[in-house]
Image (cartoon, grey):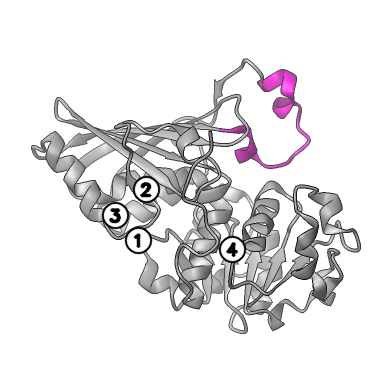
Amino acid sequence: MRVAVLGSTGYTGMMLMRILACHPDVSSIVPISRSAAGRPVTEIDPGLAPSISRLLAPTEGRFTAIEDGQPDAADIVFSALPHGAAAELVGPLVGSVPIIDLSADFRLTDADLYESIYRTVHPCPEMLGRAVYGLSEWHESRIANAEIVACPGCYPTATLLALLPFAGLTTGPAIVNALSGISGAGRKETQNFLFNERSENMNAYNPGRSHRHVSEIEQELARRSPLEVLFTPHLVPVKQGMIVTTTVRLTEELTQQEAERRLYDAYRDAPFVALSPRGIPESRDVRNTNRCDLGVRVCDGHLQLFSAIDNLYKGASGQAVQNMNIRLGCEQTAGLRVHGEF
């Protein structure tokens, strides 16, 4: 299986390359990067073992420009490009090769809403209707035939996997508090992300309804039962990992056992999503895995939901590979880790 990766030099692209390098069905990888074209891949990411050279044979172990990489000759194309740039570059490929996009360009179904949030005109709004939202556990059958798979952001992934099983049993607003590792902000040279700024420091940002992922979360909840969301993300001094706690009012009585059973039934056949043995999950249990560990508490007519993911793995590159597996008919778990690290 030949795979092309557009935008391989950011955290998401680097993690994607590492996962694909261990995938049993991947025979070659074409790493595409305008800024790094001609440079050795292992120079950008020394964490990749020299053995990856076998998979990078089509480009002799180097990044290549898109015009030389022939992405339309691949079996599947991943795009780990920023929003705006992603749709512009992969748009011409739609229809000739399946696209797995990790940007925000195809997640929203409304081009006007996209423009208001991302403050740019969508490069190809006519293609929004051809994309499938890539929350693997909830859209598997549609992903299997999709032209474009729009992988969710890390915050929506962790939030939606906890909330969706209770659609129709809750009323808003859902109060969502999310803690993310710094890598969730990308690989930017920004003062706020320097070690001295982040070490021994935590902060909330874009609270309430101002974060761009609120519309994405509400859009997906509305497919089953509309729910208003008040969302507050926080940066915490860890490299990667994410914990999300959601509190929402129940519209009918639910026991603790019934709540746990509802999550169990929703994900009984899902290889990566399950109730945490701890009751309330911790980020270290899922680090460098494609898992989402869940927890639930029923408290005085309210539902408290807890979810833990690795923001770079299940929240980005791991879920993208899971969607590739679904789209190309591979084992859904192929190449993906399920056991956490200490």
Q: Is residue 299 above or below residue 104?
A: above
Q: Residue 90: x and y, percent?
A: 67, 71
Mark 2 or mark 4: name the one nearer the start of the chain: 4
Q: Residues within 10 Å of mark 4 (few under 14, many from 20)?
A: many
Total marks shown come to 4
Marks 3/1: CA–CA distance = 10 Å
Q: Is residue 105 visible in this depiction of the protein? A: yes
Q: Is residue 58 above or below residue 317?
A: below
- Give the magenta-colored segment's residue range: 181-198
Report the residue marked by disc 3.
267
Type of the residue with mark 1: Trp
Type of the residue with mark 3: Tyr
Q: Residue 332: x and y, percent?
A: 45, 66
Mark 2 or mark 1: name the one nearer the start of the chain: 1
Report the residue marked by disc 4.
101
Which residue is at the far top?
200
Q: Residues within 10 Å of mark 3 (few under 14, many from 20)?
A: some
Marks 2/1: CA–CA distance = 10 Å
Report the residue marked by disc 1.
138
Report the residue marked by disc 2.
160
User: Which marked residue is nearer to the observer: mark 4 or mark 3?
Assistant: 3
Mark 3 or mark 1: name the one nearer the start of the chain: 1
Magenta segment's dominant SS is: helix
Residue 193 is one of the magenta-drawn residues? yes
